[in-house]
Amino acid sequence: MGIIAVGIFMFSKRKGSGKFMKKAKAKKIIPANEEIGAHLMIATEPNEAREVPESPEIQALMRSFRQCIGADNVGLAFEFQDLSFEPSPGKSILKDISGVMHSGSFWAVMGGSGAGKSTFLNVLMGKTRHTGGSVLVNGHQEKMNKYKKLIGYVPQDDIVLPELTVRENILHSARIRLPSNWKDDQIQEHVDTLIACLGLSHVSDSLVGDTRKPVISGGQRKRVSIGLELAAAPMALFLDEPTSGLDATSAASVMGLLRSISRLGVTTIAIIHQPRQEVFESIDNLLLLGNGQQIYAGETKDVTGYFHKLHFAFPQNRNPADVLMDIATGSGQQYSEDLSWREDSVQRLLDSWRRHSSEINSEDEKGDVINNAVKPVTEVRVTASTLAQQDSLKHSIDKRGSPFFSQVWFCFNRAMLQQLRNTGSFFFEVGVGALAGAVIGLSAFSANGQLFKGIYHFPFTALSSAVDYQSAIQIGLLGGLAIGMSKKYKSNLNLKYADAYPGLAASAAGVKVFGDEKQIYWREAAAGHNRYAYYIGKVLSTFIRMTLSCLHFSVFLGVLATPLMSFSSIFASNILYFYCIYGFSSCISMATKREDGPLLAVMGSLILGILGGAAPPLSKVKSWHMAWLWRMSPGTWFTEIWFTQNVAPLDYLYITDLAAEATGFSFNHVALDMGYGFPQLAGGNTLTLL
């Protein structure tokens, strides 16, 4: 009896240890509300896993994420049912896509060109509004925009500022997007830890550069782009082809980083294009699309078993990802002896997945046990978060992001730093501003300051010579055109420093803000940056260079043209008109393509200058009953300042009322003319931000 008892005891231990080993071999997904340990489960063989101690940097990053996200949060899980998108009737890009992406899971979206991968990502994120189906976040149907502060998006193109270093780019994102109660030393430590985890410590103080003049490698730029989003400690991370353009080693490094991120509790969803075999096998879950529909959705380790049941074979010497791409694009006949796959194979794959899903659904409803079948992800539903968890999530959203004035300060500092790195363009701009003022001043130099001649008061009326009502108006017109047009438009679309165009050109300076940096603006606005803070910081940063350029322009113009108006009036009118054109050009750049913005801004500035009341004269325009159109242009108010200031002092000598009637301008409205610059500026900025 004792021997039998010992045998039963040993058998029970072996049976229990077998269950334990099965659990150890399973993938370990760490949800956001689970205490993160000091190790990771890393697969070394297909059926073997081992524990590898984490680096101190990863452990520090985990603690930082935990502090930011909070221990009570459940993370973000996404459930989508019958998701469809039709941009126009009869044109379907996505159709009936269903599935669940749990918190802390790592998903790859694959498919051929035109399969709908990017559209699916945009629809799931809420960037594109779906036309059918539903998307649930943590079991609740809410607008995705509500969670934008908790979601990171890495676009396919590396949208980073080339004038800043690696650390400066990431630090700005962290300061803007991390919780407002974080102190600066905490943010600095978080950024340093993140840079170490990204493997960028050795280039942290190097300028990022751009594609025309690269400073760091393409793989490093990609990690910087990912770091901009990780700096905010998001709960979900979406990536559009993060390995595109990278070599195999860099791609493997990026994918390994994403896998580690998902272990921190971050739901990671990436579009992957032609991954190497090691990268493909490291992916937890796979969504395979074809013609905008599902071909497969589930765990990556089960994908080969599913296609084996469809009579496809995976050669041992081929990358499974390459075989899947051939099958998904309709070129998989070479992997099957079933001749029926030679015709309309993609549609048959879609029908097979729908049939497989409905069979699983019906079997599950009957309670039957399914053996050797791939259970589709559509059957696993997200458990709706409780009211307490929703409140915790809302509190996490509310505390994200620095205060408004802090964001203005950070944006201002960043813009100033960009300008300090472009000192050559700054001095060039100031120099050509002086040259423009000198050229216009020389055009009136021979007049010796006599920019107006009228009819003498009685009894000297008969002694009056030929009148000159146009010189003062023409100087105002030329000054307005110089401010709006003197920076020459260049057609080089890859120009690194767009604000290095020669001259004053407020139009080119305005285009720079939302032209070259339009992608930066939209990326940051979508991540929760305050749009007004961004623009105000930019405008304030340009004030110094604009003021100095305008100062040199005004000095040379005043010295050579010697108008009767005071220098303070010359400078004030010039700087206000400068900012009017700046705001106008910003509006143009927001509403047009990047390559069209500079040309349209210059043309718009030319039109505003022509509508200054010089030719055709404002008096003629009034007879057309179109003075309202000319008064909408800041050029008319600018020209009226020059006319008034140069004519009004001569009222003791000439009959100025006749000049006012002949030209159509009014006197004694200088305060109104000056003040008109402020609503023009404010209106332009408001339209831009809208």
Image (cartoon, grey):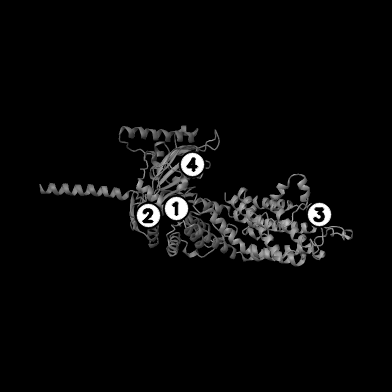
Crowd class of label 3 (few under 14; some 14 to 19; many from 20; radius 10 Å)? few
Label 3 or label 1, whichever comes before in sequence order: 1
What SS does tag 3 mark?
helix
The residue mark sitting in front, 1 or 4, is: 1
Report the amino acid beneath label 3. Answer: Leu
Residue 58 image-quadrant placement: bottom left
Q: Nearer the viewer, residue 559 or 43?
A: 559
Residue occupied by mark 1: 255
Residue occupied by mark 3: 658
* Position in image of residue 120 (x %, y %): 48, 42
Report the amino acid beneath label 4. Answer: Asp
What SS does tag 4 mark?
helix
The residue mark sitting in front, 2 or 4, is: 2
Label 4 or label 3, whichever comes before in sequence order: 4
* Position in image of residue 575 (x %, y %): 66, 60
The residue mark sitting in front, 2 or 3, is: 3
What SS does tag 1 mark?
helix
What SS does tag 2 mark?
loop
Q: Nearer the viewer, residue 361 or 581?
A: 581
Residue 134 image-quadrant placement: top left
Residue occupied by mark 4: 326
Crowd class of label 2 (few under 14; some 14 to 19; many from 20; radius 10 Å)? some
In contact (CB < 8 Å): disc 3 and disc 1: no
